[in-house]
Amino acid sequence: MDIKEALNFSGLQRFYTTHIKPLRTRINQLGTASNCTVVNNSTTTSSNTVLDGRMGKTLGDRLTNVEARVQNHFDRTGATEYTGEYKSSWTLTTQYQDIGNSRAIDNKYYSASSGHTKITVKEGGTYLVTASIIVRASNYDNIWMQILKNGAEAHTMVTVANGYTTIQCCTILTMHTGNWVSVQLSKGSQGIQTTCDGGGYLQIVKLT
């Protein structure tokens, strides 16, 4: 289109249709965004601003990091392990004895050696610790179950047993990396025959 054509009415209509109208349509589509200031940060609180496209990757990277942290927390919270299972029949005495263990553990969160119930934590946090075993008493007898933390008494519970009785206790402990828990059992009366036939366990669950 030359200048002469552009100056007549038809030329002006063509110029409007070809150039001005599409521009107006685009501006209308943008709405208020066409008058906004472009910013490239995640801290601006001013009105009439829009994000630069480069912030998309920054925000995406942050979201990926958050997702990884949430997944990591999910994996840690609820991490469970136990020792125990089976041990040959043994007789309880008035002295505390370890309930025994037949499995070794070595994973991301816990470790244990075969032969006792001791479980060592590899990460600090809050833990739920439970213990259970079935005893067989020839008459009424007091059975004491003791959960130890680093060898010191952390929780003790007494249960009256007669015949087959399940002895259980649980507690919540704050543990640091390298701390350990174990469980022991004793009885109250010398004159009552009380035995354990295996199946006792110590379980630990990470809460935080």
Image: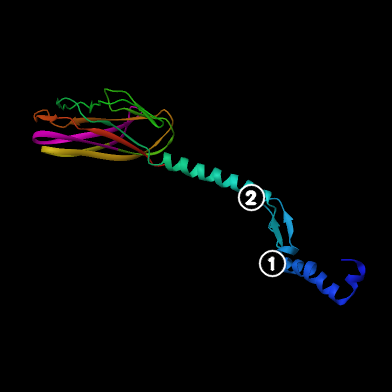
> How many other residues sit within 10 Å of disc 1, few (<14), some (14-19) or many (≥20)?
few
Question: Between 28 and 169, which is closer to the camera in this rendering?
Answer: 28
Specify the label residue 12 is tagged with.
Answer: none
Q: Is residue 169 magenta?
A: no
What secondary structure is found at the residue carrying circle 2?
helix
Span highlighted in magenta in the image: 130-155
Q: Is residue 135 left or right of residue 36?
A: left
Residue at 92% over, 68% down: 3
Residue at 78% over, 67% down: 18
Q: Is residue 154 magenta?
A: yes
Q: Position of residue 78 (x, y in %)?
A: 37, 41
The residue to which callout 1 is attached is 29
Q: Position of residue 196 (x, y in %)?
A: 15, 30
Mark toward the start of the polypeptide (1 vs 2): 1
Q: Position of residue 63 (x, y in %)?
A: 56, 47
Placement of the N terminus among the 4 image quadrants:
bottom right
> What is the C-alpha distance between the residues marked 1 and 2?
21 Å
Q: Amino acid at mark 1?
A: Gln
Tag nearer the camera, 1 or 2: 1
The residue to which callout 2 is attached is 56
